[in-house]
Amino acid sequence: MTQSSVLLVEDDKDLLEALTMTLQNASFEVDAVESSTMALQMLRTKHYHIVLSDIQLDKMSGIDLLKFIKKQDYQTSVVLMTAYGKIDDAVFAIKNGAIDYITKPFVANELITKLNKISQYHHHPQNNLICHDEVMKKLFEVAAQVAKTDASVLISGESGTGKEILARFIHDNSLRKNEPFIAINCAAIPDNMLEAMLFGYEKGAFTGAHQSTPGKLEQGNGGTILLDEISEMPLALQAKILRVIQEKEVERLGGNKIIKLDARFISTTNRALAKEVELGHFRKDLYFRLNVFPMYIAALRDRKADIIPLSNYFIKKYASQPDMMLSEQAIEKLLNYAWHGNIRELQNVMQRSVILAKNNLIEPDIILFEVSHTQPAVHAFADDTLENKMVDKENALILQVLKECDGHREQSAHKLGISTRTLRYKISRMKKMGIQV
């Protein structure tokens, strides 16, 4: 197991030294400081699994330190030390987000036992997720159970909600975790290429097939295969995938060798797949094969507890300064926004905000949202050129036709007079602009 890091905060120098030696002897990596001010400086430059702090400190109390840690959403567990007779302080700390407390005087083994339990929790794979919303926590708890089986999983939810992250979590917590995880985006690959990519091909199978090539299904043998945006797969190919799942075997294009396939299938969709079945756009038999265990990821606007933790994650990802943070007004602005583009839109917004931030503080005036998600977005940094106006008109027409065709891509492409591949490209461009499609 990876060595756990502890930030120790204690203003009694003798006790600080004794606790440091105790923790180091128990194989913890320890940084020791004498004040909350020094602790804040350390937290801005390094991630700690655990913060162990005395409640009674000179200028800023351990409770105040706890509140700051929770406000900035540093991904760390806080344990507070309090004197006997001050249990009320400890209870208050637990209510404000401390994971545990210990009363002085205590024996070394008591402290080490507590920290070891917390350390085990931190090294559990689920703890690496940014997941604070209660509904999402329950979803990942269920996912951890489902992961131990080989049941096919169908994950639904709006674009940008994190469906592939959930799929990877299931794989990482399964018995197949040391085998390949192969993700195939059915919406991004042209129809005439998707079959060859999935099944592979033998040399000479078609023009340009200069050498034998294994397909994604074959590459995923023994592991997990993610069929991302499965609703965009052509009907003819759906029948072939159904046979692969039923017979547990695959055959390359132009070949006659049967390859046995042992893989777990996870699929994602941003559509109501049952409705697609009713409309005749998706095979009913394949739907039931894939939908053994359905899971739904809520939109970001419906899980507000995740908004600020995710924002802070993206700030740390894009900022060159380790202490960049959100102001109170910025936090309020982020929480009050609808996030129709979900996490993908939040990522874009925070990347722009990091670029525009001054003095390491993100204020609300530099948090720039797209003006509309029902009409093409107006970009804050784009000139009002003829080219931009033409793109806006084109986007509006595509949205209108998609609505008229109930979202069916092939029908929409035919009505627009373009190929399905071209339509997919334009839809992908729109999504990058923050337009919900």
Image (cartoon, rainbow, N blue to C red):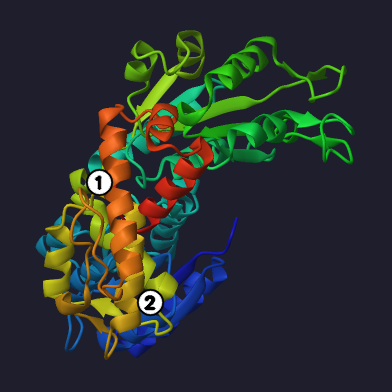
Nearest to the eye among marks 2 and 1: give it: 1
Instruction: From this view, report whether residue 193 is shown above or below residue 235.
Output: below
Q: Could you say which disc has been placed on residue 358 in the image?
A: none
Judge from the rendering whether residue 244 lies leftward or rightward of residue 165; answer left or right: right
Q: Residue at x 22, y 51 (%)?
A: 373
Q: Position of residue 422 (x, y in %)?
A: 50, 44
Mark pair 2, 1: CA separation: 29 Å
Q: Position of residue 10 (x, y in %)?
A: 31, 81
Instruction: From this view, report whether residue 148 is shown above or below residue 127.
Output: above
Q: Position of residue 307 (x, y in %)?
A: 25, 57
Instruction: From this view, report whether residue 342 is shown above or below residue 254.
Output: below
Q: Which of 374 and 230 is in front in this view?
A: 374
Q: Which residue is drawn at 20% across and 83% down?
A: 57
* Residue named by callout 1: 133
* Residue named by callout 2: 8
Judge from the rendering whether residue 246 lies leftward or rightward of residue 253; answer left or right: left
Tell me which corner region of the image, top left, top right, bottom left or bottom right, holds residue 321. Answer: bottom left
Q: Residue at x 50, y 78 (%)?
A: 21
SS for dot 2: strand
Amino acid type, label 1:
Asp
Quadrant showing the N terminus: bottom right
Amino acid type, label 2:
Leu
